[in-house]
Image: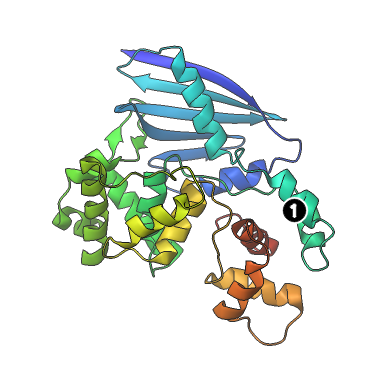
């Protein structure tokens, strides 16, 4: 039995379609997501069922289709699907406000104007963002992509389309430390991810940002309490899983290199200098970092 759900979203005129698609095209083998021309197909878990999410971008519209294995569609799923697509497309970020504030800025104004519409494209779920962040700790992008691929092949549930669905915490809990090690995880990373899954399952950890000014701090403290998770992992998870635009990307080499170029500075920009410089742009530090990254790079940030 299959079920389908359809919805459509209006996009801003300056939406960066290629950047959005490039973010989901990092693994050229395409075992869980594929990108062709103006569309992405991605395997996801939808209410514990394998599903195929298709997003097609045409002019200023995104057409979203969800093909669910073994499920019925209820009316509320259309709203949930629209919210998921808006999240992934970065449409929950008020970049227009940011641009109106900084388009005349003496240092970044020209960059922001030239790259107007830039957003930070999101993983389908915070758990996917956190899993990727744990995998990517202190290794190259290519190595992380390879481990992520083997991880999904080992744990992911297949959709009838042939694509594998990125696992949720329940599926990962069925995997042992040894199984994750076979995928390329270090002992520390394997235990960190398994601990995250156990804490989510027990209700001790909720991957959301609680209401109120201290919401991010509370989530950060909860994640920092897990052995093997540090601030780099948390900042990346906030960046790619929560639409959080105030994290600092001062440790990123590309951000510092492009900041050096922007400041016309002969000496390399240190992490400390970048952190201090970015602090003035709160609550938009991560978005400024994304503009710096995008300045001379492709869209894999």
Colouring style: rainbow
Q: Which residue has dot 1 on it?
A: 115
Q: Is residue 281 left or right of residue 24?
A: right
Foreground of the two, 6 or 199: 199
Mark 1, other Cα within 10 Å: few <14 / some 14–19 / many ≥20:
some
Residue 221: image location, x then y, percent: 36, 59
Q: Residue at x 62, y 62 (%)?
A: 289
User: Toward which corner of the image does residue 66 lie, by quadrant?
Assistant: top left
* Residue 130 image point, x, y percent: 38, 52
In this orientation, does residue 11 appear?
Answer: yes
Decide which of 195, 121 is in the foreground and name it. Answer: 195
Where residue 62 sits in the image (x, y, percent)?
62, 28
Q: Is residue 27 visible?
A: no
Q: Residue at x 27, y 44 (%)?
A: 200
> Which residue is at a point 62% across and 75% down the rendered structure image?
276
**Up-down relation of residue 162 to residue 251 (above or below):** above
The quadrant the C terminus occupies is bottom right
Looking at the rendered structure, the number of numbered marks drawn on it comes to 1
Percent position of residue 134, x then y: 35, 59
**81 and 205: which is toward the camera:** 205
Secondary structure found at label 1? loop
Residue at screen point 22% across, 54% down: 195
Relative to 78, does residue 221 appear above or below in the rendering?
below
Viewer-closest of 151 and 290: 290
Rendered-image quadrant of the N terminus: top left
């Amino acid at each position: 039995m299959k079920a389908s759900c359809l919805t459509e979203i209006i996009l801003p005129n300056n939406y960066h379609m290629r950047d959005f698609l490039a973010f989901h095209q990092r693994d050229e083998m395409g075992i869980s997501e594929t990108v062709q021309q103006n569309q992405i197909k991605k395997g996801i878990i939808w209410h514990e069922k394998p599903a195929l999410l298709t997003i097609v971008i045409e002019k200023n519209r995104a057409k979203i289709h969800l093909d669910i294995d073994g499920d019925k569609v209820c009316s509320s799923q259309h709203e949930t699907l629209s919210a998921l697509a808006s999240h992934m497309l970065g449409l929950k970020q008020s970049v227009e406000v940011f641009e109106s504030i900084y388009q005349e800025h003496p240092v970044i104004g020209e960059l922001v104007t030239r790259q107007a519409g830039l957003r930070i494209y999101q993983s389908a779920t915070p758990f996917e963002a956190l899993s990727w962040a744990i995998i990517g700790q202190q290794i190259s992008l290519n190595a992380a992509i390879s481990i992520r691929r083997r991880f999904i092949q080992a744990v992911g549930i297949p959709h009838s389309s042939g694509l594998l669905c990125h696992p949720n915490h329940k599926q990962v809990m069925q995997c042992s430390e040894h199984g994750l090690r076979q995928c390329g995880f270090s002992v520390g990373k394997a235990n960190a991810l398994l601990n995250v899954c156990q804490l989510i399952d027990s209700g001790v950890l909720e991957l959301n940002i609680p209401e109120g000014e201290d919401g991010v701090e509370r989530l950060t403290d909860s994640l920092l309490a897990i052995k093997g998770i540090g601030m780099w992992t948390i900042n990346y998870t906030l960046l790619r899983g929560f639409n959080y635009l105030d994290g600092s990307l001062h440790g990123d080499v590309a951000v510092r290199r492009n900041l050096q170029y922007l400041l016309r500075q002969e000496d390399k920009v240190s992490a400390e200098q970048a952190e201090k410089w970015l602090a003035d742009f709160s609550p938009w530090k991560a978005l400024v970092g994304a503009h710096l990254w995008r300045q001379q790079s492709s869209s894999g940030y």
